[in-house]
Image (tube, rainbow, N blue to C red):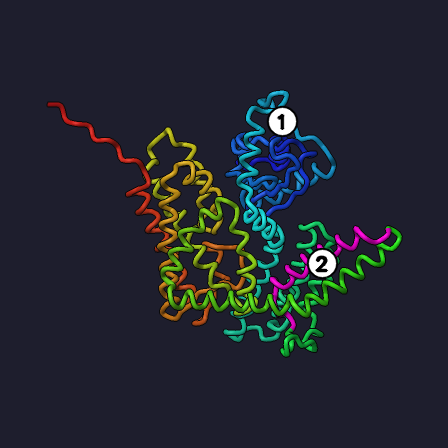
Amino acid sequence: MRNDPASTAAAVLTRVGGPANVTSVAHCMTRLRLTLADPAAADEAGLRALPGVAGVVADGPAWQIVLGPGVVDEVTAEVAARVGAGQPGVRDAELGPDTQVRDGAELRERRRRRDATPVRTALRRVANVFVPLIPALIGCGILSGINGLLLNTGWLPGLTPALSAVASAFMALIAVFVGHNTAAEFGGTPVLGSAVAAVVVHPGVAKVAVFGTQLAPGQGGVLGALAAALLATRVEKWVRGRVPGALDVLLTPTVTVLVSGLVTLYGLMYAAGAVATAIGTAADWLLATAGAAAGLLLGGLFLPLVMLGLHQALIPIHTTLIEQEGYTVLLPLLAMAGAGQVGAALAVYVRLRHDETHASVLTTIRSALPAGLLGVGEPLIYGVSLPLGRPFLTACAGGAAGGGFVGFFATLGTRVGATAIGPSGWALFPLLTGNRGPAAAVAIYAGGLLTGYAVGFAATCLFGFPRRPRVAAPA
């Protein structure tokens, strides 16, 4: 039975210290993302115990609460409404009168600060820039795939130009959206971040020469837009702190756009273009020379990234590859981790199906397996494999095997890519393409999924459970 979003939102707010303790609310495909003013005021164990919560990732002030697709949209809206209105969360009957003061709060906060390394913090903030863009990337990617199918078959020739425009418009202007989100995330004015990032995609940059080379519109892509908006935010803050208040409205935006725009044209676009080219070259080289090994590594390590909530930091790399080649070759490899997870969950179900002491785990598998097949793995991770321990490792082994399968064919010259990011599992099939066409990509990807299922299942059956000690026969 599905939980009421309003009740879930109220219970979540109660356990994170109330609406006043929440400074920002967002969500991705499966996770409610909250920024807390005082992380020590949150009750992580209480959050994990809530019905409908599949897992919690706490990284300093950034908290990710795994709720699952569809549900997360509704709960986020309820949470945002309560935070915006300043309404207190409904306190559950089982809570004591003071849930914000707990033994060990200071110790937990010190541990979270220790774990919140500069690298993890930077990756989290970059993810916050790109996560809100995922729905548009998915929608436009699917439309692009449909349009490609129509072009290949010759069906509806009058519709394909319009469909191409609809599918491509977002990607053509994605730099502007990246600039907006970057400025908002790092404390600048979003529209100024958009204005400077728009320089990257403006057709007029083709008339600008840097180091004797003409710039190209879109050079540097999302990486250039990200760098441009970061610079704009720094310049804006510097100017605003030094001009008189009466002149702020005139001078701050003018100097910000002028200085940041010129530096973007004469430095950042060139540098970001070189980095983007290096990313594409490295991905092609890696798959061509060490495809199977790369697939094993990427497929095997992706589940731990998902568990830590760091997988979203790969979005800029995926987007850069899509801008360059029309598809990302990394996503199909990483998607194999979900196949290993599904195989491991099936093995757990088969092994424990008659064990009444694990009834809650079996219920979780039955409810979360359809989502797992469609590439949403968090419910199975937090509800099944991670609590049991060994099945998490055997699921990683299944993901490695599936990734190795797909990577092996890349070494042979057949690359599998996805025209958009977001979905995985079966949901990725409509987005598949490659250098040998969609049919070959679909066949190899399906083989990788089957390999991941089989190895995840077999490894869990063989190694996913503690061996029972042998009882010596009586003398």
Residue farthest right in this picture: 246
Residue 447 in sight from this viewpoint? no
Q: Nearer the viewer, residue 144 or 259?
A: 259
Query: Which of 274/45 is in front?
Result: 274
Q: In this view of the protein, which residue sits in the foreground, 4 or 156?
A: 4
* Residue, disc 1: 100
The spot of residue 397 in percent (x, y) is 36, 49
Q: Residue at x 37, y 66 (%)?
A: 409
Residue range highlighted in magenta: 217-244
Say which residue label 2 marks.
Answer: 232
**Residue 45 part of the magenta segment:** no
Q: Residue furthest top?
A: 97
Question: On the rendered image, what quadrant is the C terminus found in?
Answer: top left
Question: Image point 65% across, 75% down: which residue?
Answer: 210
Q: Residue at x 45, y 54 (%)?
A: 425
Callout 2: 10 Å neighbours few (<14), some, many (20+)?
Answer: many
Whether residue 148 is visible, yes or no, is yes
- Image spot of residue 441 (x, y percent): 43, 66
Residue 436, position as x, y percentages in the image: 43, 72
Q: Amino acid at mark 2?
A: Ala
Q: Position of residue 121 (x, y in %)?
A: 58, 47
Disc 1 and disc 2 in contact, CB within 8 angstroms: no
Q: What is the secondary structure assignment of the residue under circle 1? A: loop
Q: CA distance from mark 1 to mark 2?
A: 39 Å
Q: Is residue 218 magenta?
A: yes
